[in-house]
Amino acid sequence: MRNSAELYLQTLQKHFAQAPQWFSSGLSHPVTPFVPATGAALTTYQGGQYTAFQRWFHFKEAFSPEFVSAAIASLGYRPSHVIDPFGGSGTSAITSQLLSINATTVEVNPFLADVIKAKLSPLTGEKLLSAAIDFQAQLQDTPADLARLAHLPATFIEDEGKDRWIFPRDVARRLAQYLTCIDAIEDIDVQRFFRIVLGAVLVDCSNVYVNGKGRRYRGAWRLNQPVPEKLDLHFGQQFNTSFEDVMRFEQRPRSRVTVINGDSRTALQEVQEKADLVVFSPPYPNSFDYTDIYNVELWVLGYIESSRDNLTLRNKTLRSHVQVRRSYEGPKGKSKKLSSVLDLLGSRRDTLWDSTIPEMVGAYFHDLELVLEQSQRLLESTGRVMMVVGDSRYANVRIEVATILAELAESMGFGRVTTREVRQMRASAQQGGSFQLAESIVELTL
């Protein structure tokens, strides 16, 4: 049975509408309806912090449900399986689930993988409400043992002799109570839900904020430090926000969605089921290490417990940054544009803020080549790959990612390769700041 693009969009408009304020959550956000755009598909969803499921955790930029639905609709037939090798906020997975389409998503960050799993879990309002009552009762009687946070780096908790700290000592003690009570929840889906709720409010209840490539201390933070009551308030508000979405969508379709927490360069080898659509947006080659962006959540929630864990996770990420030293090798396929870029970067190595950037850029495309090889293996003959990619710039050398990937894809034997620019982005300060860089969609078929 064929399903029109209009039907897909209508379905998503229904499912992704702003959830009603059924509970006294203290939130009063204006309704942000899901309105299909005309013309170019929106690739990101900056208004997603007010939208069902998207508002479970704030992402600077995430796929818009519209883009995913447009990618699905572009096939011209109802797909049976969708793959997203870079899961992120889980928009591809939840959109597929709402449309009764099986999906597989890969996410290297264990915290983000759990965010996706929490959104997809078969939770019920009744189960969460019962768990919340028990949780609140236990919280009051749980010892505030800072040994629960003994694994945290020295900068995380206030103590004598420290110049800076992310959490005041009394807030850290309250966090220890929350974590102990969460660990005691036996139902894994419910436990994960509570952990994600806590993760969503950690930064807001700290002395730092996330900006650019990592965390920064707030202005006059010593005079305006958070207190345990703020943590309690924010946790309660976030719980109600996510609880509303669970209640509203209890009866949503339950297609089979697999979430793999792993390195997409290798994890896709585990997947054997063919896909009609492979849709993703990889990290851009802009030297951002996204493990830094989620550093607070990863450490406090126990996803990493040592510097070795942190290094291991960083080494599993795409080679889009130089924060850790790794081996570098270029792609096997041919790209004249990439060769030209690497020659230019090599000639300007002395002006680069890191001398290994030329090698990083080459390795970045080798990594994406590995993802494309697996995508090619898994793609149905009538299917397609759709990537959202962004350019970068170093020493006034523009890295035209879409063009390079198109050339590599042709070298790999993809049949039809098209690219189109969808928006302009501002470069980071390290890359010049004022330059405008293209974000593009690359579409591939066999």
Image (cartoon, helix red, strand yellow):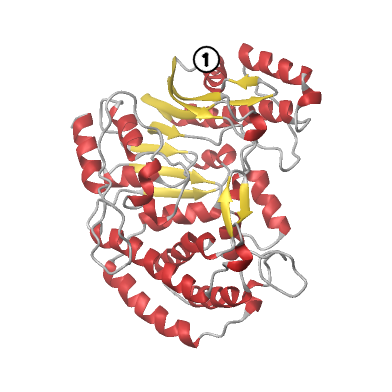
Task: Name the residue rendered at 29%, 66% in the picture.
Answer: 124
Instruction: Name, please, the residue furthest toward the bottom.
Output: 141
Q: Position of residue 188 (x, y in %)?
A: 44, 67
Q: Position of residue 196 (x, y in %)?
A: 46, 61
Asked whether, in this view, residue 266 is left or right of residue 181, the answer is right
Task: Name the residue rendered at 55%, 40% in the picture.
Answer: 264
Rate crowding at label 1 as few (under 14), some (14 to 19) or many (20 or more) other CA atoms within 10 Å. Answer: some
Placement of the C terminus among the 4 image quadrants: top left
Q: In which quarter of the image is residue 152?
A: bottom right
Task: Say which amino acid is labelled 1.
Answer: Glu
Please tell me which residue lies in front, 322 or 435. Answer: 435
Confirm whether residue 180 shows in the render.
yes
Please tell me which residue lies in front, 90 or 19. Answer: 19
Asked whether, in this view, residue 16 is left or right of residue 304, the answer is left
Q: Where is residue 366 in the image (x, y as percent from the top left)?
A: 63, 28
Task: Name the residue rendered at 72%, 66% in the picture.
Answer: 154
Please tell me which residue lies in front, 346 or 318. Answer: 346
Asked whether, in this view, residue 359 is left or right of residue 236, the answer is right
Residue 223 vs 208, above or below: the answer is below
Please tell me which residue lies in front, 340 or 166. Answer: 166
Q: Is mark 1 on a helix, strand or loop?
A: helix
Placement of the N terminus among the 4 image quadrants: top left
Residue 255 vs 326, above or below: the answer is below
Confirm whether residue 334 shows in the render.
no
Task: Name the residue rendered at 63%, 60% in the picture.
Answer: 304
Q: In which quarter of the image is residue 336?
A: top right
Q: In which quarter of the image is residue 2?
A: top left
Please give the residue where the numbered disc 1 appears in the rendered image. Answer: 410
Q: Position of residue 414 (x, y in %)?
A: 48, 18
Residue 372 vs 198, above or below: the answer is above
The mark total stands at: 1
